[in-house]
Image (cartoon, rainbow, N blue to C red):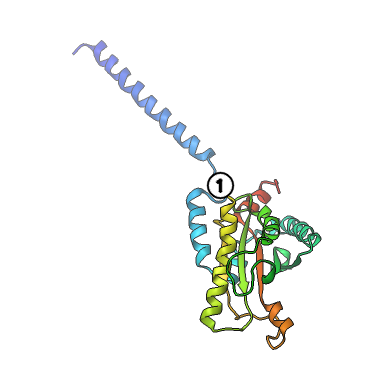
Amino acid sequence: MPLGWKNGNLAIKNHAYMNFISIICAAVLSLSSFQLPLFGKPSLDKYHEEILEMSVEDNLHSPEVPGKYVEVIKDRQMSMAKFLKGKGMKVETTREGLAVVVTIPAAQLFFPNDTVLRPIADKTLAVIGHYLKTPDFYKVLVVVHSDDTGSDSYLNGLTESRSNAVVDWFSARDLPVSGVIPYGYGADEPIASNISRKGRETNRRVEFYFIPGPEMIKQAKSKKL
């Protein structure tokens, strides 16, 4: 076999080998510079599935906010609470200021013993819906309560249907609701005595819990909040 042919064949092999090494190096560099977002698409899908199965208490305390971002998120929540109070709403904070709770009398949204939203409910829900425009910026729990007038099965069904009606209202207006979780609590958690008419009226309420969502935490980390 001629020596020149051998050398040429070796050169071809070396060239192919170097090309292969270049491709591998480029791939490694590409992977090293690639950073996964706080919640990628698969992670968000899993997050949405999990929160639907969680209790109010468990949802209230998740996701965890890293310590270095707590204060900036608290400031954001306090600003929101102040705005909603200015709209005449009953507003409180919980989870040491990280979550905002808005309580609305059921009569402001529903007729007695009805699960269809009143026309005047639009004004109130439009204010709430404003905070749903950015997907997963908030995780919102819609918790509906009743007085104790009626059987447990009736009251549980009533409050569950009402909570779903609220979520449907948001969905019908093309607001993202994957992070909105409805709960019907029936008469299980009264905040007043059901003996008096005033007490029963107080117990019939809809609570909106605004909890920092993955998008809010992501923005806090990137200093965009």
Give 76 or 160, whichever is nearer the viewer.
160
> In the rendered view, would you say 31 is above or below 123?
above
Give 181 or 196, whichever is nearer the viewer.
196
Question: Can the viewer see residue 55 in this picture?
Answer: no
Residue 159 coordinates in the image, percent (x, y): 57, 73
Q: Quadrant of residue 55?
A: bottom right
Q: Amino acid at mark 1?
A: Pro
Residue 133 coordinates in the image, percent (x, y): 64, 50
Question: Can the viewer see residue 160 in this picture?
Answer: yes
Task: Farthest residue to the bottom: give it.
Answer: 195
Task: Farthest residue to the right: give it.
Answer: 86
Q: What secondary structure is found at the residue carrying circle 1? A: loop
| Number of numbered discs visible in the structure rendering | 1
Label 1: which residue?
37
Give 154 or 66, whichever is nearer the viewer.
154
Q: Quadrant of residue 98?
A: bottom right
Q: Is residue 52 left or right of residue 82?
A: left
Q: Quadrant of residue 35?
A: top right
Residue drawn at point x = 70 percent, y = 78 percent? 201
Task: Farthest residue to the left: give it.
Answer: 1
Residue 156 coordinates in the image, percent (x, y): 54, 77
Residue 23 coordinates in the image, percent (x, y): 41, 30
> In the rendered view, would you say 70 is above or below 155?
above
> In the rendered view, would you say 216 is above or below 91?
above
Residue drawn at point x = 51 percent, y = 58 percent? 48
Label 1 CA crowd tier, 10 Å (few <14, some 14–19, many 20+) = few
Residue drawn at point x = 73 percent, y = 59 percent? 77
Which quadrant of the rendered structure holds the N terminus? top left
